[in-house]
Image: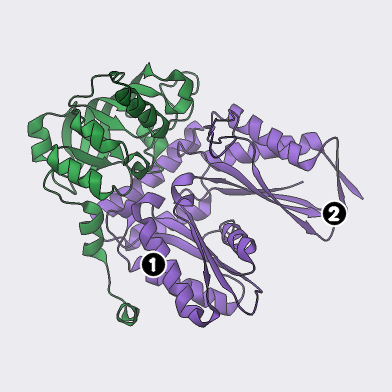
Chain colours: A purple, B green
Amino acid sequence: MKEVQYGDIVLKVAELCKEANTNLGEDVLEAFRLALRKEESDTGRDVLNDLILNAEIARNEQVPMCQDTGMAVFIIELGQDCRIVGGSLNDAVNEGVRRGYGEGYLRNSIVGHPLTRKNTGDNTPAVIHLELVAGDGLKIHMTAKGAGSENMSRLQMLKPSDGLDGVKRFILETVKAAGPNACPPMVVGVGIGGSFERCAYLAKKSLFRPLGERHPQPEIAKLEEEMIEEINRLGIGPQGMGGRTTALDIKVETAACHIASLPVAVNINCHASRHKEAVL
Amino acid sequence: MAIRITAPLSEETIASLKSGDRVLISGTVYTARDAAHKRMTEQLEQGRELPFDIRNQVIYYVGPTPAKQGMVIGSAGPTTSGRMDKYAPKLMELGLKGMIGKGYRNADVREAIVRHKAVYFAAIGGSGALLSRTVKSVELVAYEDLGPEAIRKLAIEDFPAVVINDIHGNDLYESGVQNYRIQSDSDSAH
């Protein structure tokens, strides 16, 4: 059985938090450059150029690209033959978030209770999803999820008779309603199937996939390609001011579901699609 | 080509601005978001004065990240304006002339913008590192306990923004999208 030290997890998580907020992924930058070639709106082109410049400043000066440095959300793949030594995995992740957000001068955006709303002061607790997998590995996926786009996300329990058309309609309606609020060009994460809560999780999980990459299953890849076209016909454009680039990409994940159900979740991400991963 | 304007805003400046104009704002603006707006509204309800003279001023909806050593401010881009919709008409009634944020405003706010001759600007959401460079000084005004949500007075220079709602009732979020929308075959089926 492999052993991983509590302290090593803390250090790695802190690094991921800082890295995610200051160093925009090459996949996102490439998506900006591609969009710039297609964008017809002058204001839209200005926005895309400013976003590329903003990412450069953030990386060079090690400052957050956006002031909403997000809620820290983790998907952790823990091998069943891997043992955490020196403390609990949850504690290690939260300690890492506390350190990373402090050392990185990141904004503390978490309130401890949704109704009394007092800021916890260290951006904890993180949202941690654990997936138990075969082997002895420990893989940590992290995203810093901003609220502007998160707030525009939706889930609906469709009827099986609504079918693929119903799913497509719901995705388009959600993107349309999100408009400028979600800081477009956005990334659209879609979950189809599962139970109520698994569907939402699938939508979130899809956002961890790199931009520009299609789903390995051909029929899902086809749906992604069709929907990115449809979304970019809406005219919302960069920052919702009109243009061709409403979404940089769309990701779809599916799961088995009940004979009576067709759940669909759309988790919207802003253009600052901040996802990082590490293996311990 | 961007138009250079100064904040606080004069009547002439506001009257000259049109939805879709790109502007560079210099002068002073006040920061406030959800918690500060809630507190300001409570103070007014108690018959107390606002913590600053709001007449002709511009409020920037922002909650910056902490400033690193040697820097004036941290990352400082706009937050979603719709969360301030509940409070904005009252502030315009008291003389607020400009708001900088991002995203849709509701019908009450759009109507108040026309009635009180004010203007709503959007800055690029998620360009906080770039926008922070236009902030030259920061002074705490009120509600320090709110941390990033406190009211601060910012001196800005050539802060880039776009006019979304003007005094004529135009809305770039409607007109801009109409200009670029492509009707799909599936639209008629819906």
Coordinates of residue B165 in the picture (x, y in percent) = 20, 46
The label number, if any, that marks residue B88 in the structure image: none
The residue that label 1 is drawn on is: A231
* Label 2 neighbour load within 10 Å: few <14, some 14-19, many 20+: some
Q: Quadrant of residue A165?
A: bottom left
Find numbered disc 1 in the image and state the secondary structure of the residue it sits on.
helix
The residue that label 2 is drawn on is: A136
Which part of the image, by quadrant, shows the N terminus of chain B?
Answer: top left
Coordinates of residue A264 in the picture (x, y in percent) = 53, 68
Q: How many marks?
A: 2
Of residues A122 and A257, the one drawn nearer to the viewer in this rendering: A257
* Label 1 neighbour load within 10 Å: few <14, some 14-19, many 20+: many
Residue B31 visible in the snapshot: no
Disc 2: host chain: A
Give the residue type at disc 2.
Answer: Asp
Give the residue type at disc 1.
Answer: Ile
Residue beneath the point at 48% across and 73% down:
A167
Residue beneath the point at 63% across and 60% down:
A197
Coordinates of residue B21 in the picture (x, y in percent) = 17, 45
Disc 1: host chain: A
Q: Quadrant of residue B94?
A: top left
Left or right of residue B146, residue A128 in this image: right
Of residues B12 and B132, the one drawn nearer to the viewer in this rendering: B12
Farthest right residue in view: A1
